[in-house]
Image (spheres, rainbow, N blue to C red):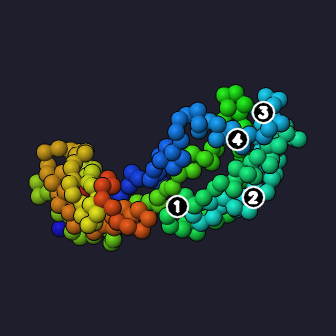
Amino acid sequence: MERMRIAAAATGIVALLPLCSAAQISAPGSSSQAEASIMGYYPAAARAAGVSGNATLDCLQTERDRLTDCRLVSEGPEGLGFGDAALKMATLSKDRLKVSVPSLRKRIAFTFTFNFKPPSIQPDMLTSMGMMSVIKNPDYARKPDPALMRWPSGALRSHVSGRVVVDCVVTKEAKLDPCAILEEQPTGWGFGQAALDFVSTFRMIPMMRDGEPVGGARVRFPVDFVMPK
């Protein structure tokens, strides 16, 4: 059988996902109570003067996305306590990841913005720093083997090339189920079924959340049937 070329790649549509909402973390009794808690960290002198400002810190970001060892780099306007307030807010930082990610550990610039009207401090360390999960996209347990591709017989005899895009769900058990044809060009030659048969031979690693396998991630495989010239 003539050699065929494959271009197959898994693309996971996943990212860091919050495990809980801000309300579940801070559990404020009302929006006014939450606002009062936030403004408790607003510099008294700046608040009395009705002044907004900002402060930038140099902090060590840990493997679990917590801020520590923070130092004041700049504040503006000076002399109104924005720097001290930012340092106090930084001490509220907690681990945000359930597992360690060594590449996160580095020193970073972290800026707090204090708005007098409407009253807010961003980022709001009281309500916006909820726990997050570390997500790894699905991947191949082993690379697809082009030798397992079967060219539709009619297309092979007529020297017709084709392209198919297959969309699948990766289960917790690392199976591709279900799979569906998103694109088939040209139609009527059997390329779609041939691509589904080929994709069924793939061996996957499921999406991982905090080191544990989870199902439901979608992947797409473009499969090209290219007639040799």
Tell me whether the residue at label 1 lies in contact with that at label 4, contact meaning CB atoms closer than 8 angstroms: no
Observer-side mark, 3 or 2, equals 3
Mark before the other along the chain sequence, 4 or 2: 4
Marks 4 and 2, how far apart at CA: 20 Å
Local packing at callout 2 (Cα closer than 10 Å; few below 14, some 14-19, many 20+) is many
Per the rendering, the mark at residue 40 is 4
Q: Amino acid at mark 4?
A: Gly
Find out whether the residues at labels 4 and 2 contact each other: C-beta distance under 8 Å: no
Q: In terms of secondary structure, where does tag 3 sit?
A: helix
The tag earlier along the polypeptide, 2 or 1, is 2
Q: For residue 39, say whether it is visible.
A: yes
Left or right: 29 as drawn, with respect to 135: right
Where does residue 126 sit, x and y in percent of width and height? Answer: 61, 47
Q: CA distance from mark 3 to mark 2?
A: 24 Å
> Where is mark 3, residue-wise?
47
Using the numbered discs, state the Cα–Cα distance from disc 4 to disc 3 in whole angstroms. 10 Å
Say which quarter of the image contains residue 153: bottom left
Image quadrant assignment for residue 198: bottom left
Say what secondary structure mark 1 lies in: loop
Look at mark 2 in the image and give the residue it sits on.
70
Sequence order check: which comes first, mark 1 or mark 4?
4
User: Distance between the Cα atoms at labels 2 and 1?
Assistant: 19 Å
Label 4 residue SS: loop
Q: Amino acid at mark 3?
A: Arg
Residue at (17, 60) in percent of width and height: 197
Q: Position of residue 41 (x, y in %)?
A: 72, 43
Judging by the rendered image, the residue that carries numbered circle 1 is: 97
Please name which of the two marks, 4 or 2, marks the residue nearer to the observer.
Answer: 4
If the image is split into quadrants, where does the C terminus sit?
A: bottom left
Q: State the residue in front, 93 or 105.
A: 93
Looking at the picture, tell me which residue is in the foreground, 219 or 129: 129
